[in-house]
Image (tube, rainbow, N blue to C red):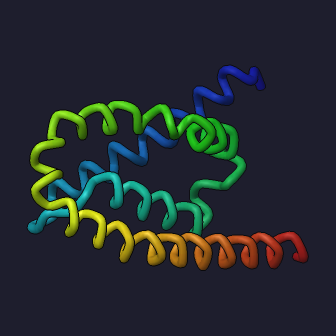
Amino acid sequence: MNKTLHFSLQLAIVIAVCFAGDFIVNILPFKFSSSVMSILLLLFLLIIGVVKFDYIKNISSFMLGNMAILFVPLGVSLLSYLDVIKTILILFVVVILVTTPIVYAATALSAQFIIKMQNKREKK
């Protein structure tokens, strides 16, 4: 298969999951993040085997490798709210100091779980 087409198909799968996640969020009777719903939907599809990891491997690596670019607009927009941030700076720092270790721990535990799952799959 043509590598560009293969990459395009992988992108199409990810975009389709994102649209499906957004659709699900719009029909829910409560507020929920569509990006989180899309991630949960993709996880569910990977677990039940509808989407194989190989189907999205290249596009996932590309997106992870270029993720920093997506945070540049966010950082620039924060500068426009600098006066608001100054008023709650201590609270802001406390929240960052408390949540950062929690995120690190959740990421480490998730990575360990995925590695164990991959090792079990490879042994079969």
Up-down relation of residue 124 to residue 42 (above or below):
below
Residue 33 placement: quadrant: bottom left
Which residue is at a point 15% across and 41% down the rendered structure image? 81
Provide residue 20's location: percent of width, then percent of height. Answer: 34, 49
Which residue is at a point 57% across and 35% down the rendered structure image? 66
Provide residue 14's location: percent of width, then percent of height. Answer: 49, 42
Viewport quadrant of the C terminus: bottom right
Which residue is at a point 23% across and 36% down the rendered structure image? 79
Provide residue 22's location: percent of width, then percent of height. Answer: 27, 49
Horizontal relation, residue 86 to residue 45: left or right: left
Residue 15 placement: quadrant: top left
Horizontal relation, residue 41 to residue 87: left or right: right
Up-down relation of residue 114 to residue 13 (above or below):
below
Numbered circles on residues, count: 0
Which residue is at a point 48% across and 32% down the rendered structure image? 69
Up-down relation of residue 61 to residue 2 (above or below):
below
Viewport quadrant of the N terminus: top right
Provide residue 3's location: percent of width, then percent of height. Answer: 74, 24
Horizontal relation, residue 52 to residue 104: left or right: right
Camera-nearest residue between 80 and 13:
80
Residue 110 placement: quadrant: bottom right
